[in-house]
Image (tube, rainbow, N blue to C red):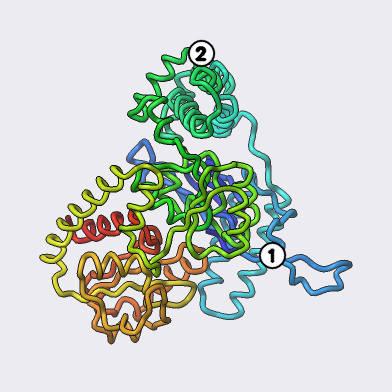
Amino acid sequence: MHVLTALILVHEGEGVLELADRKRLVRKGDFIVCPAGSTSLFYFHTPSNPSDASNSGLATMFHFDAYRWGENFQESPTVPDTACPWLPSSGKLASQLERIGVYCRSIFEHFYSGEDRSLWLARIEFEHMLHEISLYAETPCSNDRMGAVESTKAFIDQHYADELSLEKLAGLAELSPKYFAEQFKKYYAVSPMEYVAEVRLRKAKQLLASGSGPMKEIAHAVGYRDEFYFSRKFKKSFGVSPSAYLKTRHTKIAVFGTSAILGYLAALDAAPYAAPLHPKWSPYYYRTMGPDIPVHLNAYQHRQFQQENLEQIQAAQPELILCSSGVQDWELDVLRKCSRVYEIEGAHGEKAWREQLKDLGALLHREEEADAWLAGFDELLAEAKQSLSSIIGGARVLPIRLFNDNFYVSGDEGASETLFTQLGLVPSEMLNGLKPGDSRRSTLAEIRKSDADLLLLVVRQDSHTLEHWRSIQRHSDWSSLPQVKRGTVYVMSSYPWREYSPTAFVHMIQDLLRISGN
């Protein structure tokens, strides 16, 4: 996630930028501005020719703050200008790319020189560079092959119900069918017609979940003229027929609040109609359940978007709303006016998570699924205990977290439940006195002196924390840690390690088995 506005400049190679649920293709000379608060993923394509591996890609990313002046330039510029209207959101720098590259190298050298005056020079050169970008940026050419492929994909997303063929799509891109198919698969890992089928069947799932009409109408709505052919395609893709899938969605469910509730529903093989999802903060659910969930609520900065989420739930008209027991009273009042509400307790509730899973299974008429899942979990847990006891043994484990510039000893409920309650591993003494769910600021000096044999580190995925993480790894204070020297520091992801849910427990156990070589 970009805490500040981000500017990405591509100097060599070509790749993909995922921003705001959209993939865009980029190559040499392109630049993209990612607004503050947005989440992006950028990666280069692997060269098809091995001899080009050393030149696979080169890009520069800058994070910066921008402020706007008050009226008539009388007020101090303290209002954040996150939109940056003076800077194009994207474009090409074909004629100025070499000059921009010189700016980038000079800014880097000044910024990391360690001299205060050089930091000033870095800022001046950065502002000059922004000015040149705003002056000389070109819009992407309409015949750009990557832009053509991307535009065709967007056309499929909007017109999936039309009669689509490879020849028609290639014609839209103004490319030969063979070349278009090759380029499409290169960028999206599936053929054009496979992608058409994916979009149609994903939309069909959503229509089935919303009870949008008879099977024949749904088949026609997603581009299939023959409902029996549609049924065969659906079963081949998802393993069940549309009618069988419909039976699993007999209750229209909405989830409000934390996406951890999806960890209970996933264990029951039940998908809601509306739920909070985010590609970065709930990546597993976004990837595996997202296509089946018609209404995606905002899972990032929930409090900021709570009113918008409540309005979306009201519009969805669910039969049942699941929420955590920590929601505010006024939110509960709104939800109860909309539908029946069922609260799921967190780690501090009176009921253990196993009992809560079985209760939810009974509520959704999925008792068999709950029992089967718990049996499978117990089998995994027994195998993991045996494997980890022979490898980790009595080693003392310390979960820590890096946020901004500080390390924290972490007492996250999900991690503590998995590590110490379920698996019976030995906690470090640094956890003594720490209440479940709390964290305590710590230093590398304290960690060095601790009894911890194994560190499980979660690094928050925001630009400031990641920059500090890159910096601290080059410092002797980090490299001299006994755990670093022994190779017993493991960087774990926020999901599952900061979540308390049945599905997260499984993934934490699998993570531990993976790092232990099992």
Q: Residue 101: name its quadrant.
A: bottom right
| Amino acid type of the residue tagged 2 in the rendering | Arg
The tag on residue 433 is: none
Q: Is residue 457 visible?
A: yes
Instruction: Tell which of 278 and 506 is nearer to you.
Output: 506
Q: Residue 302: name its quadrant.
A: bottom right
The residue positioned 51% from the left and 15% from the top of the image is 167
Instruction: Tell which of 242 and 221 is nearer to you.
Output: 242
The residue positioned 23% from the left and 56% from the top of the image is 514
View extreme (right): residue: 72
In this figure, which residue is indicated by the disc labeled 1?
66
Q: Position of residue 217 (x, y in %)?
A: 54, 19
The residue positioned 54% from the left and 45% from the top of the image is 296
Q: Position of residue 16 (x, y in %)?
A: 49, 43
Q: Is residue 258 above or below residue 487?
A: above
The tag on residue 225 is: 2
Q: Is residue 400 left or right of residue 460?
A: left
Q: Position of residue 198 (x, y in %)?
A: 45, 29
- At mark 2, the secondary structure is loop
